[in-house]
Image: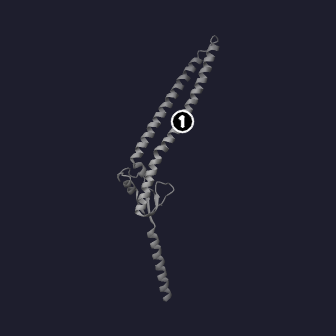
């Protein structure tokens, strides 16, 4: 009987110790995508990127239109070749071909440059936004005493059970209303 009582107290002590250890490790989760998308800076940055993209697309479309016009003119000129003007028209077609190749290269260069500019603008606009959100996440996590905070926007996290969702606390810290950008899809629990 005494051994049974000792085993009971040891088990109770281990259970109590495990509960204390668990109580010290507070867990929470958030959705960083919802936080970032709700920030006013995000909307401004997205608008700036869309404007830049449209501007670059319009420039490239104009060059493509010029290419098509010159190509059609060259095709029309090719139909006018006769024995009498073969040499003159041939030289004009060679010049037109060289001009078309040059224009095609400029179009390809413009596309590559536009892509680089968009990537650079994306980094320039969104890195400070991500840093601001990360600072707010760190501040709220420290204020609330969380040992671990999981991001449900991360596709590697496929399961969470319990914990406190601090997405609204982060939004509040950033001065964003709690109702802004409601979750589009809730993470699945397995």
Residue 91: x and y in percent read 63, 17
From the viewer's side, name the closer residue of 4 and 24: 24
Q: Is mark 1 on a helix, strand or loop?
A: helix
From the viewer's side, name the closer residue of 126 and 15: 126
Residue 36: x and y in percent read 43, 50
From the viewer's side, name the closer residue of 45 and 11: 45
What is the count of numbered marks? 1
Q: Is residue 121 left or right of residue 84?
A: left
**Quarter-of-image position of residue 169:** bottom left
Around disc 1, counting alpha carbons within 10 Å, would you say few (fewer than 14), some (14 to 19), or many (20 or more)? few
Q: In this view, does 99 lie above or below 176?
A: above
Find the residue positioned furthest to the bottom.
1
The residue at which mark 1 appears reads as 113
Q: In this view, does 59 lie above or below 39?
A: above
Residue at 44% in and 37% down: 51
**Quarter-of-image position of residue 46:** top left
Residue at 59% in and 21% down: 96
Residue 132: x and y in percent read 43, 51
């Amino acid at each position: 009987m005494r051994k049974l009582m000792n085993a009971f107290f040891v088990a109770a002590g281990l259970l109590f110790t495990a509960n204390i250890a668990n109580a010290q490790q507070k867990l929470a989760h958030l959705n960083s995508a919802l936080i970032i998308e709700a920030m006013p800076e995000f909307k401004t940055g997205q608008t700036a990127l869309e404007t830049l993209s449209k501007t670059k697309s319009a420039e490239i479309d104009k060059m493509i239109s010029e290419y098509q016009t010159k190509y059609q003119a060259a095709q029309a000129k090719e139909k006018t070749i006769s024995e009498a003007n073969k040499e003159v028209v041939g030289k004009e077609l060679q010049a037109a071909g060289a001009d078309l190749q040059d224009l095609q290269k400029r179009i390809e260069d413009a596309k590559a440059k536009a892509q680089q500019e968009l990537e650079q603008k994306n980094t320039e606009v969104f890195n400070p936004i991500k840093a601001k959100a990360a600072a707010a996440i760190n501040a709220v996590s420290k204020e609330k005493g969380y040992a671990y905070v999981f991001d449900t926007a991360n596709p590697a996290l496929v399961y969470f059970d319990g914990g406190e969702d601090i997405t609204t606390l982060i939004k509040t810290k950033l001065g964003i209303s709690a109702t802004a950008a409601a979750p589009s899809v809730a993470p699945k629990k397995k």
